[in-house]
Image (cartoon, helix red, strand yellow):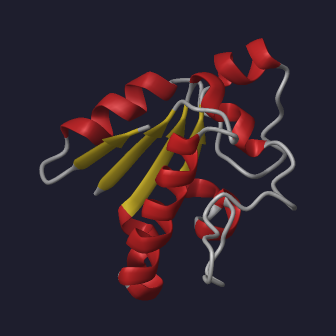
Amino acid sequence: MRIILLTKTPQSERTRLCLRLLARLVGSAGSIGSADVVVYLAGDGVYNLIGQDGLDCTIQAGSQQGKTLPALLPRERIIACREDLLARGVSADGNATVPANFYELLVIDMMKEGSRIYTF
């Protein structure tokens, strides 16, 4: 399993790098690629759920492969921290799963054998 912990705002260069990596991970594995990737949104990372329709953080010059976070992964593979959503006044609006035990799920996924963890 590949775990991505995103804590940066959509305007951050680290977020753009994260979403480009995510596009490659999902794209390189074909249709089953998203089943092996989970994105956890914490801190300012929850802002990546706002206004996703027009936001494209992965597009590069000469590339037509730009995607948004919800376009890359299904809702069940995007996990957002409830406390951070509430603290920032952000709503998941059906784009992410919001569990009551965010950090417990994150640690369980991190401890699974074969997990790779990417933090941005």
- Residue at 69% x, 62% y is 68
Q: Which residue is at the far top? A: 87
Q: Does residue 76 lie above or below 104 as drawn?
A: below
Determine which quarter of the picture holds residue 28. Answer: bottom left
Q: Between residues 14 and 93, which one lies in front from this camera angle?
A: 14
- The spot of residue 112 in percent (x, y) is 19, 44
| 26 shown above or below 37 | below
- Residue 80: image location, x then y, percent: 61, 35
- Which residue is rendered at x = 42% and y = 87% of the image? 30
Q: Quadrant of residue 65?
A: bottom right
Question: Count of labels shown?
Answer: 0
Quarter containing the C terminus: top left
Which quadrant of the figure has residue 107? top left
Q: Is residue 75 above or below residue 118?
A: below
Q: Residue at x 69, y 42 (%)?
A: 10
**Residue 24, position as x, y percentages in the image:** 42, 73
Q: Is residue 50 left or right of residue 104?
A: right
Left/right of residue 95 with respect to residue 72 in the rendered view = right
> Picture coordinates of residue 9 (x, y %)?
66, 34
Q: Is residue 62 left or right of residue 89?
A: left
118 left or right of 76? left
- Residue drawn where x is 62% and y is 64% of the image: 74
Say above or below: 118 vs 44.
below
Seen as rendered, the residue at the extreme left is: 113
Quarter of the picture holding the N terminus: bottom left
